[in-house]
Structure formats: C-alpha cells, structure tokens
C-alpha cells in the first residue's frame, strides 16, 4: 500500500536527458491525439453492433449516457494530468493516491485496455480494407481475413473457417514502425489523418441526412426481449457500456503528459476539448446511420457505415469514405500503441517491470523495446480473436480505470487539500462520485463472460506483481 509522493512524481516530470521522453506536444497536438483515437472503431464499427444487439436506434442515447460518464471522469483526469505531468495516466495517479498494489492493478488493466483497443481497430480496418478492394473487383481469401473462431459463407453456400486476420496483423506492424521513429513525427501524421476523419464524418452526415427513412426509428427503443441488455432501457445501458470504448481518447491523452511542452495548461485543454468535439459528432452520426438503414441490418458487422452508404445512389461516396476510414483508422492504432508503451515506460521506471521497457532509443528518444513487444502481443490479438470479444474487453478495462481515477481525486483532496493544482475538478465530491456511479453501472451492464476475462487477466497480473514487481519496486529499495 506504499504511495509514491507527489514530490517524487514532480521530480520525475522535471528530469531531462537521453533516457527521458522528449517534450514536443502542444495543446493542438493533444486535442488532435484525443480526437484521433476517439473517432475510430467505436464510431465506425461498434456503433452498428451496439444498435443491432442492444439499443436499436436509441444507440444515440447510449452515446449520451457514455458521454456523461466520460465527462465526470474527464474532469478528474484533467486535474491529475495538470497536477502530475508524468507518463502513465491512471497508473501514475493510482500510485500517488491508492498505493502500489492498486497502481499495478490499474497499470495491468491499461495494458488490456489499450492492447485490445488497438486490436479492435485493426480488425475493423481489415474488414473495411476488404470492402474497399471489393469495389475494384479484388477479394482477399476469407481464410486470411478472419480469426480461427469465425466463419464466412460463400456465394455458393459453402462455409469457410478463418485462419488468421493477416491485414490486421500487418497494419499493427506498419504503425509500430512509425511510432518507434519519434513522437513529433507520429503527432504530425496523426494530425493530418484527424482532419481527414472529421471531414469524412461531416460528409457522411451531410449526405446521409437526405436519405433518412423515418420508419427506421420505429420503435426508437425496441421492446426488451426478456433478457437484460437486449433492447429496452437495459439495452440502452448495455449499449452505452459497449460504445464507451470510443471515448478512451482523452484517457490516452493523459498518458502523454510527460511529452507535453506546457502540461499544466495543455493537458486539460487536450482532455476536455477532444471529448466535447467528439460527443457532438457521435450523437449526430449515430442518428443519421440508424436512420439510413434499419438497425437489424448491422448485426455481426464491423463495417456498418458501408451498409448505410449502400442506401444511397452514390457508389463513389462509399469508396471515398471507406478509403478515408482506412487511413483514419491508422491514427487510432497509432495513439493506442503510443499510450500503451508510455504506461509500460512508467511501470518499468518504477521497477515493476523489467528495465528494458523504459530504455529509450538513443536517436529517436522513444521506448522502442516496449513498442516491439506490444507489436507482437497486439498482433496476436488482432489476428486470432473476434472483434466482439476484444471490443467488450476494452470497454470494461476503460471503465475500471475511470473509476479508480475518480476515486483518486476524492482521496487526494482529502489527504492533500493544499497541494498546488493548475486545474481543479469542479463540484468535488459530487463530480467524482457521479463518475464512479455512472462507470460502475455501465461495467455491471456488460456480459458475464467479459467480467470473467477481466478477472482472469487481473489474476495473471497479480501473479507477475507478487513474483517480480513487488520485490524489485524502487520504493522497496528506498524504503527505510
């Protein structure tokens, strides 16, 4: 339960040298990083899954519920990010408030969150790639587009089992090579594709609005089937738990604090700004998409936008948007991988993971060994696990981290009320408590098998902590 002091964290934030991360990000870069990852798989893929399986057209309400929970958590993240501008996000905040064991749990949870988040996007990227090539009469073998747990039915009725989602694996490898070469170059690449993705969303909304069929909104909240989470208001809540995945962008912004030029000012702007912009876009986007096609048509599809576009007489629009989505998806994978490697970097510097993960490349000043390891790990997820499984795993991991951050603000306000805070969460303790309640409700609305996977993952993490990290922790070495 030992705690890492704020003084020590600030000392780490002020360090410089070859083995420290380069401060090269401004407020615009941070907002772009947030938007870059928020507008991604959740919007272009999980929106359709949440509508088809849980909320129906009321998926727009699911976005609102998820956004409210995010708003409470974002305010808490902003206080911590400005107060403790160190890489690691929720892991670092837990270390300063709840103690080393809880910090490890959150750090290990973030490994799950970002890793399967990147895998989810890579899988969806693969499906959109197949559709894009299909417009030119090209088709990749289904065995190389699906995981071993998925099947595809051919035009002749034959059923083919997948072997590996090869395009998903390859895109992870390509993005890793970009990240290793430096944060500033990655930020520029991300900013370019963010502009493209926002334009894609606006074009889809503008054109799709003219092809909305009001009949597709009836009923707006489909009657519950008798099973919790299958339509009705419980379906709206479960849909919120599923699409909550899309809002992890501001969470990842917090992991970049040690690379911000002026973190006290820029971190709150990056976190809150990206959330506000994306929430507005999500609600309107979900409304248009479920108006263009009936929600039942999106069932088991990771490319619902393509289905909606088929309702228009503009085939070129489908090619343009799907092509832009493919480019835009790369920024989501990029930011997920950036965030994950920075969590590894912090955990390694604290002695909880091997020192290799905090070794910085002498030229690029990036934690390149972490990047390579994550490339292998995430590539395996992307190649061999279905999208529904990885999407729900990401949501529950994100929600757990948000609960811990909200709890951390309450604890630190109580223990150190006079500590300097460049940004203060308003209406404490109301906002953190509401954040905890909202996130907890969405966590409990997720399926039981998702909880089981989380418990197994955390159990593996605890074994690693007690056999390696606990004995090698730098706080242990400095303890009297």
Image: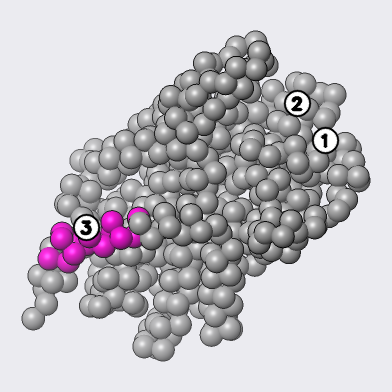
* Viewer can see residue 405: yes
x then y, percent, for residue 456: 35, 57
Query: Going 51% across and 59% down the picture, which residue do you hit?
Result: 448
Above or below, 92 against 460 in this view is below
Residue 463 in percent (x, y) is at: 22, 60
Magenta residues span 457-471
Check disc 3 and report its element: helix, strand or loop.
helix
Contact flag, marks 1 and 2 (Cβ < 8 Å): yes
Mark 2 sits on what residue? Answer: 317
Q: Residues within 10 Å of mark 2 (few under 14, many from 20)?
A: some
Mark before the other along the chain sequence, 1 or 2: 1
Q: Which mark is residue 42?
A: none
The residue identified by callout 1 is 207
Mark 3 surroundings: few (<14), some (14-19) or many (≥20) residues within 10 A: some
For the C terminus, the image quarter is bottom left
**Gap between marks 1 and 3, in whole Å?**
52 Å
CA gap, disc 1 and disc 2: 9 Å
Query: Which residue is label 3 attached to?
Result: 464
- Residue 460 on the magenta segment: yes
Q: Residue 267: horizontal and vertical position, in percent?
A: 48, 62
Q: Nearer the viewer, residue 381 or 424?
A: 381
């Amino acid at each position: 339960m030992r705690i890492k002091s704020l003084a020590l964290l600030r000392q780490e934030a002020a360090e410089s040298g070859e083995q420290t991360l380069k401060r090269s990000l401004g407020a615009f870069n941070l907002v772009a990083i947030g938007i870059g990852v928020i507008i991604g798989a959740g919007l272009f893929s999980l929106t359709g899954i949440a509508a088809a399986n849980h909320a129906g057209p009321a998926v727009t309400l699911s976005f609102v519920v998820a956004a409210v929970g995010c708003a409470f958590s974002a305010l808490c993240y902003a206080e911590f990010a400005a107060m403790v501008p160190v890489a690691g996000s929720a892991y670092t905040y837990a270390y300063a408030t709840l103690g080393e064991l809880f910090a490890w749990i959150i750090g290990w949870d973030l490994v799950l969150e970002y890793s399967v988040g990147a895998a989810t996007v890579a899988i969806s990227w693969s499906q959109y790639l197949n559709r894009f090539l299909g417009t030119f009469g090209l088709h990749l073998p289904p065995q190389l587009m699906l995981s071993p747990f998925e099947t595809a039915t051919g035009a002749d009725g034959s059923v083919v089992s997948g072997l590996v989602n090869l395009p998903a694996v390859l895109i992870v490898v390509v993005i890793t090579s970009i990240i290793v070469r430096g944060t500033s170059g990655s930020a520029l690449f991300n900013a370019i594709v963010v502009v493209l993705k926002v334009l894609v969303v606006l074009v889809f909304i503008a054109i799709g609005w003219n092809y909305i069929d009001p009949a597709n909104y009836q009923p707006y909240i489909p009657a519950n089937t008798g099973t919790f989470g299958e339509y009705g208001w419980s379906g709206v809540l479960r849909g919120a738990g599923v699409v909550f995945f899309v809002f992890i962008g501001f969470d990842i912004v917090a992991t970049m604090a040690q690379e911000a030029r002026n973190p006290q000012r820029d971190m709150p702007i990056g976190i809150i700004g990206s959330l506000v912009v994306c929430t507005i876009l999500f609600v309107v986007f979900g409304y248009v998409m479920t108006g263009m096609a009936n929600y039942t048509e999106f069932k088991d599809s990771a490319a619902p936008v393509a289905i909606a576009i088929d309702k228009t007489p503009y085939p070129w629009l489908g090619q343009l948007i799907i092509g832009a989505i493919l480019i835009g998806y790369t920024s989501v994978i990029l930011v997920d991988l950036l965030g994950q490697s920075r969590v590894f970097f912090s955990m390694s510097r604290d002695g909880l993971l091997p020192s290799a993960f905090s070794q910085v490349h002498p030229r690029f000043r990036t934690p390149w060994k972490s990047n390579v390891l994550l490339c292998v790990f995430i590539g395996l997820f992307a190649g061999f696990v279905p999208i529904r499984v990885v999407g729900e795993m990401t949501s529950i991991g994100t929600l757990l981290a948000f609960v811990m951050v909200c709890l951390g603000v309450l604890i630190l306000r109580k223990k150190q009320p006079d500590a300097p805070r460049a940004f203060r969460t308003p209406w404490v303790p109301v906002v953190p408590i509401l954040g905890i309640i909202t996130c907890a409700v969405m966590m409990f609305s997720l399926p039981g098998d998702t909880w089981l996977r989380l418990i197994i993952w955390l159990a593996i993490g605890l074994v690693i902590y007690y056999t390696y990290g606990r004995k090698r922790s730098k706080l242990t070495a400095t303890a009297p």
